[in-house]
Amino acid sequence: MKVRYCSPMPPSTSGIADYSALLVPELQKVMDLEVVSAPGQGTGNDCDVALYHVGNNVEAHGWIVDELRRRPGLVVLHESTLHHLVAGMTIVQGDREGYLDAMQRDAGVVGRLVAHGIIDGVLPPVWETRAPDFPLTGRILDSATGVIVHSQAVEDALRDRGFGGPIYRIPMPAWPEPQVEVDEVLRDRSGPVFGAFGHLNSAKRVPQLVRAFERALEREPTARLLLVGSPSEALDVEAPIERMLATHPGSVIRIPYVAEQRLWNLIAGCDVCICLRYPTMGETSGIAIRALSAGRPLIVSDVGWFAELPSSVAVRVAPDDDEIEELAAAMVALARDPARREAMSAAALGLARGELSLERVVELYRRAIIDQAGGDAVRAQVVHDIAVAAHDVGVGMGDEAGRAVRAGLWDSGL
């Protein structure tokens, strides 16, 4: 098979570029891959399947949506809410009608009225406050011959929105076991380190995390909080940290954006990684996957993909009124229980090397692409071959063996 693979690639700083950089070399071992990482590359006229990675960054994915509209194909949907992407492709570029149509396509007359309110300045931008209420995936799904998702939560969301095409649930793969050296800022620590990584914004619950850690310090004064990443302009991260440092010197280690290798070194130096998210756009956390790949226990929000992580690897905390106290309690409990952290670490490595292994993910991709290339013909041939084989060994439709064959065909979707 020849597959036209449209995705951002390094040096793009998109997390999906990192994902594709990991996946592409392995996919190339089992299929003919034409990698397209910018508009205008190649023609794709002779490919069997066109595959499109779609996320919320308009600079990284806007051109991919344009390609998808020209030629429908298999979409890898990295988030179930694409309001930021669609707004960036329409209203931000002066295309009012495009935004009005997208809002009406997903939310009817109410959506169109809300869009008018935003355009007229009467309402605040929905993408800043209520994006999950208006996911705007319709424009993408209209051109999708099938969708690859990373979680049951996203699959359910797409079915709820009426998508009737094939959905293939394929987890985000773990990274190969990294070669790391604990970063120098963490080498002389005396207590447990809790690390949070990535762009620091309100959706990652940074204010709640800082307040929860302050409470945890009252019970575990040797604990340390590592915050790594660039801060959101809309969020004052530094002021509460400075206040905490005034009363608890050295309790918080603040590092801005770091390159990939240092990121791994810092993750390796943590006892627990914290990945919070609310509201969620249906995304899978690349940081959480890296933490699992490095055998780090997790504390996560009990929403979306994060809620699907097994309790053996992650403590889940609901983003409700009790969130801060529950976060603090989770940190204290893990800080005081090294045996539990060790068991969670072993379970994290087991998950990374099993269900999330790169080999398994590549095989699931191969099956999805085969199905897209000629799924009906493949299924018909498989059923035919099984029927002939059953006949040749004397299996009858009404006997016990025949019923077992039919049950197996049913269970496997054939």
Image (tube, helix red, strand yellow):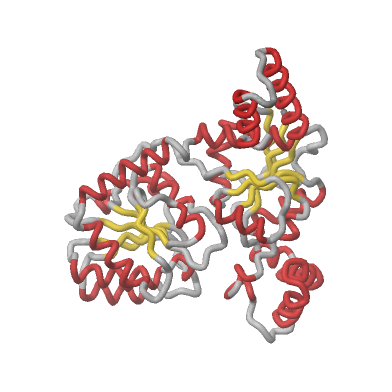
The single residue placed furthest to the front in the displayed view is 398
Q: Can residue 282 be seen in this view?
A: yes
In this orientation, which residue lies closer to the viewer: 347 or 284? Answer: 347
Q: Is residue 247 above or below residue 259?
A: below
Identify which residue is drawn at 25% across, 72% down. 215
221 left or right of 301?
left
Q: Nearer the viewer, residue 145 or 402?
A: 402
* Residue 333 as seen in the image, left or right of residue 178: left
Q: Is residue 94 in view from this perspective? A: no
Spot occupied by residue 47 in the image (x, y as percentages of width and height): 77, 33
Q: In which quarter of the image is the C terminus?
A: top right
Q: In which quarter of the image is residue 249?
A: bottom left
| Image height of 367 relative to 134, above or below | above
- Which quadrant of the figure contains the N terminus? top right
Residue 216 place in picture, x, y as percent: 24, 68
Residue 349, horizontal then vertical, whole percent: 36, 40
Number of marks in the rendered image? 0
Q: Is 20 placed above or below 209 here?
A: above
**Residue extending furthest bottom?**
122
Residue 412 shown left or right of residue 192 in the figure: right
Query: Residue at horizontal 50%, vertical 55%?
Result: 305
Q: Residue at x 74, y 49 (%)?
A: 144
Q: State the image coordinates of residue 20 (x, y, percent, origin top left).
A: 58, 42
Q: Residue at x 62, y 35 (%)?
A: 412
